[in-house]
Amino acid sequence: MNQEQWTAVDGYFNQALIPPDSGLEATRHANREAGLPAIDVSPNQGRLLHLIARIQGARRILEIGTLGGYSTIWLAKALPRDGRLVTLEADPRHAAVARENIARAGLGPLVDVRIGEALPALVRVKADYPEPFDLIFIDADKANTPEYFKWALALARPGTVIIVDNVVRKGEVANAATTDPEALGMRRFTELLAKETKVTATAIQTVGSKGYDGFVIARVD
Ligand code: SAH
Ligand code: DHB
Ligand code: MG
């Protein structure tokens, strides 16, 4: 098994199961043109997020780490007309591209893109959105994932789904001697999750066009 095969199989299911979507395709194109790093979720992963949001019946979604809004658009498409998605992005250039992409996809009225470091922004999100979020997707700077998870719990209700991207990092998460700050962030997050009695969680390893990584999926009990 190798990267070439993972990419081919990802492409096969992508082509077979995901109808072309002009908003999503324009977003990938605009992100490339703007020179954004190609680290958004893959199409099959975007659809997984979309499906989980629909299965959950999510009306309020929080995303930490917008980039160009590709995952944002997948998630926002799962919302009802009166739904809301708040997404936090530190880089103003990324946020500007995301706003354009989200508006082009016709989702502007549903999405609140907030520019700034996520930790201070979360204080204001809690003040501005008194109702809990139904789904929270954490996908920003990996070292701060433990802090984002604590915030996710503070903004959740029993039944809220929390999804964390990039928890495997090519397997480095299982290396107890790792010095990689991203893997260390995910190990600390996993320790926190393990101690949290109010949450049921698992991790799924993924391969595909983005290589070898994974998600944590958790439900607040
Ligand atoms: N969710 C996106 C990918 C996000 S990439 C998608 O799948 O389409 C991670 C993003 O987090 C980058 O745009 C980066 O600028 C942003 N980021 C990094 N550190 C941050 C911080 N401290 N606060 C908010 N955003 C941050
Ligand atoms: C990478 C992938 C991601 O999904 C992300 O959020 C950040 C970085 C990467 O492959 O480097
Ligand atoms: Mg990611």
Image (cartoon, rainbow, N blue to C red):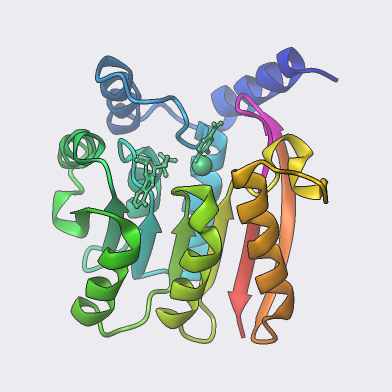
Q: Is residue 11 visible?
A: yes
Identify whether 111 is placed above or below 159.
above
Q: Residue 17 location in percent, x, y? A: 57, 32
Q: Is residue 21 left or right of residue 103?
A: right
Residue at 26% x, 22% y: name it: 30
Q: In terms of depth relative to the viewer, which is nearer, 201 or 75?
A: 201
Q: Is residue 78 visible?
A: no
Identify whether 30 is placed above or below 111.
above
Residue at 47% x, 51% y: name it: 50
Image quadrant, ligand 1: top left
Q: Residue 8 location in percent, x, y? A: 68, 16
Q: Which residues are magenta?
A: 207-215
Q: Residue 188 location in percent, x, y? A: 66, 62
The prevailing secondary structure element of the residues shown in magenta is strand
Q: Residue 26 location in percent, x, y? A: 27, 24
Q: In terms of depth relative to the viewer, which is nearer, 153 or 206?
A: 153
Residue at 53% x, 59% y: name it: 145
- Quadrant position of the N terminus in the picture: top right
Q: In terms of depth relative to the viewer, which is nearer, 164 or 174?
A: 174
Report which quarter residue 207 is drawn in: top right
Residue 97 within the magenta-colored segment of the rendering: no
Q: How many marks?
A: 0
Q: Is residue 70 left or right of residue 17?
A: left
Identify whether 44 is placed above or below 66.
above
Identify whether 38 is placed above or below 186.
above
Residue at 22% x, 81% y: name it: 127
